[in-house]
Amino acid sequence: MAGSTHTVTNQAPPLTGYDVFTADRALAEAVERHLPAELREEALAELSGTGRGCGALQTQEWGAQADAHPPVLRTHDRYGHRVDEVDFHPAWHRLLGKGVSAGLTDAWSRPGGHVRRAAGLVLWTQVDAGICGPLSMTHAAVPALRTDPELAAAWEPRLTSRVYDRELRPAHLKAGVLFGTAVTEKQGGSDVRATTTSARPLAEDGTYELTGHKWFCSAPMSDGFLVLARAPGGPTCFLVPRVLADGTRNAVLLQRLKDKLGNRSNATAEAEFAGTWARRVGEEGRGVATVLEAVAAARLDCVLGSAGLMRQAVAQAVHHCAHREAFGAKLADQPLMRNVLADLAVESEAATTLGLRLAAARDAAEAGDERERALLRLAVPAAKYWVTKRCAPVAVEAAECLGGNGYVEESGMPRLVRESPLNSLWEGAGNVQALDVLRALGREPAALDAYLTEVGAARGADHRLDAAIRGLLTELADLADGEGRARRLAERLALVLQGALLVRYAPPEVADAFCASRLGGDGGAAFGTLPPTLDLAAVVERARPTA
């Protein structure tokens, strides 16, 4: 009898069993656009395979399991020996292995590698953002280690490997390794030059003994870490292996794991260095500059990770509203809900388009294009500032599109909401990014020239974009009081660049909606306030994920 009252109707089916890559038109088009013709067929096939894997029910269940069972720290074994190990749920290892085999640490060794990896990162973030932390740091370690050719030769082949080897043993015995970072200290935060961790030179040239405490040690079960410490010559970057060449554990003492808002499948520890062996990376006193090589790569990953989270939030919202009925029609066909969905979709596409454009610039810069390298210097911190800040409101609004269902853990939307602020904090919070934009404007004229060349390619195509470019030039003409308005400058730089890219590459209805609302002032502070005269149905249909 009880069962007769529980007939389930008017519910959207699970969004599963689909190709997450091909269903994301903005992402697939960006990959085609930015890869040379000779690489496209192989890359699209590879990414489609990754997309099907990401959309599979089993993979999605692994993501939920990894999030629901956070890592656990074991400081000692049963006999009282110090072990400092972190135990993860099996789902974590399955997902991390899939991410490694999908090439998420392999951007540096193949043509078009950054675009291909960027697309893969957008896809895997939608399964579980936690695994993307160690994958991102492993990827970002490569440019820092390249400041020391000997270290790069020894470590880079393993860093870019597609083999996930979870065993703790010396790196030279492994086919693939992962990297973490330990830079931030409790007294300094973003002021990394205030490091109090000390580095005492040892007899062997380039080796040191570290003593100190790190407030955030990311991915503490990695094979190696980039660490900042104060050597006799000043703040210096070091490589700290988890296991020494003779098979003994290095003195990396894990004090506790952070209990975080989101990113719960990934471990972040407080770590104590007490007689810890380290190898110098780069010159003494140049540690901040060396670490910033890794930071620049990781900041782009923050943009891509936020784009992935936004895409999954929008996909879930559009999918739900395309199946759910209210007041005699599908929710997606109701004018007000259509406006909300279209507004969210525009934000998501703008983030994806910008992120992939910057990945393409990284490929070009690696090939020797100095203009593209200069563009990255200004565009990455601006994009990191703005795109990561847009992620949280998109996730919250998308969850609201599901009504009460979106507030229930089983929907997956609360995971996205909890995860959404992370990329804005990681690798330098908003003020750090805005001030970095200001530094680039003041010290590197080539960066602004490259930026203006990029947005100038779209001039004349939309009057609102043209007006926004003129307004930006007026703001940039006088930077005397720039620090107090650095956030405003970073925001405008990112918005104008997004608008220019959408005008050039997106369907007219998407570019029109963006320029009207984000550049032309014809939109409100909340989502769902687009001008009703736009072709919103086409925008929503473009964002709809299909099996």
Image (cartoon, grey):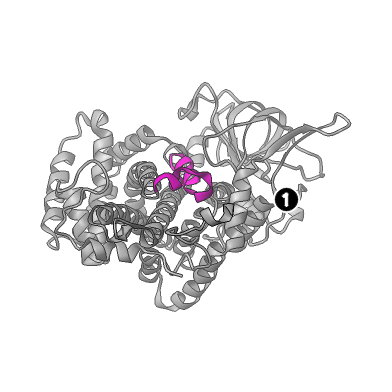
Number of callouts: 1
In the figure, residue 475 lies in which quadrant? top left
In this view, the residue in front, 357 or 386, is: 386
Q: Residue furthest right?
A: 79
Residue at the (42%, 56%) spot, across then down: 316
Question: Which residue, given by chain and number where applicable, does mark 1 sit on?
Answer: 171
In this view, the residue in front, 7 or 541, is: 7
Q: How far from the left and from the top, in percent, is residue 525?
A: 23, 41
| Left or right of residue 216, residue 25 in this image | left
| Left or right of residue 502, residue 43 in this image | right
Q: Secondary structure at mark 1?
A: helix
**Magenta part of the protein: which range?**
403-422
Residue at the (60%, 29%) spot, across then down: 214
Three-letter amino acid code at the position of disc 1: Ala
| Left or right of residue 373, residue 531 in this image | left
Q: Main secondary structure of the magenta part?
A: helix
Q: How far from the left and from the top, in percent, is residue 201?
A: 67, 30
Q: How far from the left and from the top, in percent, is residue 349?
A: 33, 58
Residue at the (54%, 23%) spot, across then down: 186
